[in-house]
Image (tube, rainbow, N blue to C red):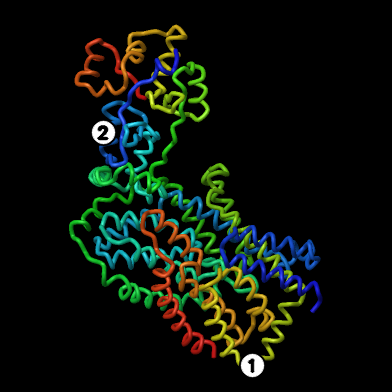
Amino acid sequence: MTTTAWLAIAVFAAAYVVIATEKFNRAAVALTGAALMVVIGATRGEQIWFSADTGIDWNVVFLLFGMMVIVGILRQTGVFEFLAIWSAQRARGRPFRTMVLLVLITAVASALLDNVTTVLLVAPVTLLLCDRMALPPIPFLLAEAMASNVGGTATLIGDPPNLIIASRAGLSFNDFLIHLAPIVVVLMVVFVGLCWLLWGRHLRYDAKRADSIMALTPRETISDGPLLVRMLVILAFVLGAFVTHSLTHLEPSLAALLGAGAAVLISRQGHEGYLAEVEWETLLFFAGLFVMVGTLVHQGVITDLAHWLTSRIGDNYAVAAHGILIGSAGLSAIVDNIPYVATMSPLVHDLVGPAAGLPPDKASLWWALALGADLGGNATAIGASANVVITGIAKRNGYPISFWEFTKYGIVVAGVTIACCIPYLALRYF
Amino acid sequence: MRAEQLSEQVPTVRRETTGAEAARMIAEFRLNGLVVADDADEPIAVIPGSQLLSVILPQYVRDDPRLVHAFDEAAADELCAKLNTMTIGQLIDAKRLKVTELPSVLPEDTLLEIASIMDRGHYPIIVVRDKAGRYRGVLTMSRVLAAIATAAGQDSHLVRRRLEHDIIERGRPGYFASDTRDGEAGEGSV
């Protein structure tokens, strides 16, 4: 390897460590790392702007941006608050039934929207419901954070690591539905059982307090009915475009941008309305990260690492897939799974190539990476963005959740769900 | 007019005053802010009255204002009743009430000097202290404006009355009833 390549590794490693400490703004660290890559001469404009392999993957950035705009307008309609209160009323204020419905709503919403947005929408209404039912909100909030990570695993747009994997591997929305959605359904059934064991059996039903749930008026939370209907139509079209990608060849990023454009037009909102939910910091973090990882690819570091790994693995893809699954879960529990997957994706790409046309044993490495990174995030309070957001909301509302309290439950959920994936990978791909 | 002539006594709350008692005081004295006093009854800080409104709103409603529509009247009363369980001190410590330190002026300071200090920090109330640091009273926005109105030739029965009577006198029985008897509107707040 050249001196420049070693310098690039040093910059990348330093940025990674600083990001992992969470003491500095992660977008600023990633952009500083990207700038240093340019300064040391390890990458150039052409690699950064015009190559998804060695620079910024615009498909991922604009898919995220488009979905953020759509969700930002959709959330203003109050539909999520309506669904949560309505479901608690359907559960007649029974604590565990309410928890199950909230968990299912969170999981489905997380599969279609991003996890952070979903928990931001569900957490406040959960606190309201627990307040009315005189129930401790922490079990509900923990269950929702974990359900968002499990549910988000099911689709291409459900969790940011999936976006990166899809783009690197050339996987479609339907590929995720076929390969990950079935196991996620199984995992959700298992997770509901875990919810009972960990929290549900300790919750006490109070008939009088349950009645106060029935007095709530969910319809009042719908602020704009006509806009809600139009937004649901747009969301359906965007999801339809994702599913029919093989026929239309419309990139998911373009489908999301077209949907976002339509949403802006029909909502007639100013930029302060439709851009309110766009997380610029996340988008910049992705851009900086792509430049850093792309530089390692450009400098041949990832290829060298892949060659070394290939010599160790040989044809034993079953061991490699399970190693990636468990290793990714372990690492995602302690570091942000987005930079982890951004680094691992080019490595897996060099190991087995793009997913199209791969035999099942080789393709399993991509699915092992997605499952490990997405589900491993449940293990600790810092393992996934949704966990960080939910502990922040809980603290602000007077219910602090310590790192260890989260981990005590998270490690069980992550362990059991990853354990369920081991036979799934073995039976389906080998 | 000088600060000494304009200073007055106002009702104050202590750290142990409950939120509900503070709300009652605001209503009874038509205040727009709460003056927090120390053990010697000297004002040490002011809390805008609107902050007491935010205290009855749970944090999750402030995070997601659409949820407020889901509450019925009984649930809203229940939230208001929670003001009885929280003291001003607890609310300040929990950072649910933001306290503004009170700046001070000297007794001999002029109306313009007083206006300048109030304008600089948007203070509805400031303290008068002598050179030795002894507390002499407070200056409220309404009394300072009454002095300004008089200087500008806008004299009236109510303006004169505002200059002659301290806010704390509003607590006396029949104080506001006398407004009605005179056929004039009641006074404004702090």
Quarter of the image for the N terminus of chain A: give it. bottom right
> Closer to the camera, A314 or A339?
A339
Q: Is residue A193 visible?
A: yes
| Amino acid, disc 2 | Arg
Chain bearing tag 1 is A
Instruction: Say which chain tag 2 marks.
Output: B
| Quarter of the rendering containing residue A42 | bottom right
Q: Percent from the top left, x then y, of residue B111?
A: 48, 16
Quadrant of residue A327 in the image? Answer: bottom right
> Which label belongs to residue B63?
none
- The residue depicted at 70 percent of the width and 82 percent of the height is A305
Residue B97 locus on image (x, y percent):
38, 42
Residue occupying image coordinates x 47% and y 9%: B152
Q: Residues within 10 Å of mark 2 (few under 14, many from 20)?
A: few
The residue under label 1 is A315
Q: Position of residue A244 (x, y in %)?
A: 57, 68
Number of residue marks: 2
Closer to viewer: mark 2 or mark 1? 2
Instruction: Tell me the residue at 67%/62% (across/down).
Output: A288
Q: Secondary structure at mark 2?
A: helix
Residue B120 at x, y percent in the picture: 53, 28
Q: Secondary structure at mark 1?
A: loop
Real-space CA distance between mark 2 and mark 1, rounded to the nearest whole angstrom: 79 Å
Q: Of residues A54 and B79, which is closer to you in this image?
A: B79
Vertical comparison of A348 with B138: above or below: below
Q: Which residue is mark 2?
A: B24
A213 lies left or right of A47: left
Rendered residue at 29%/23% (across/down): B168
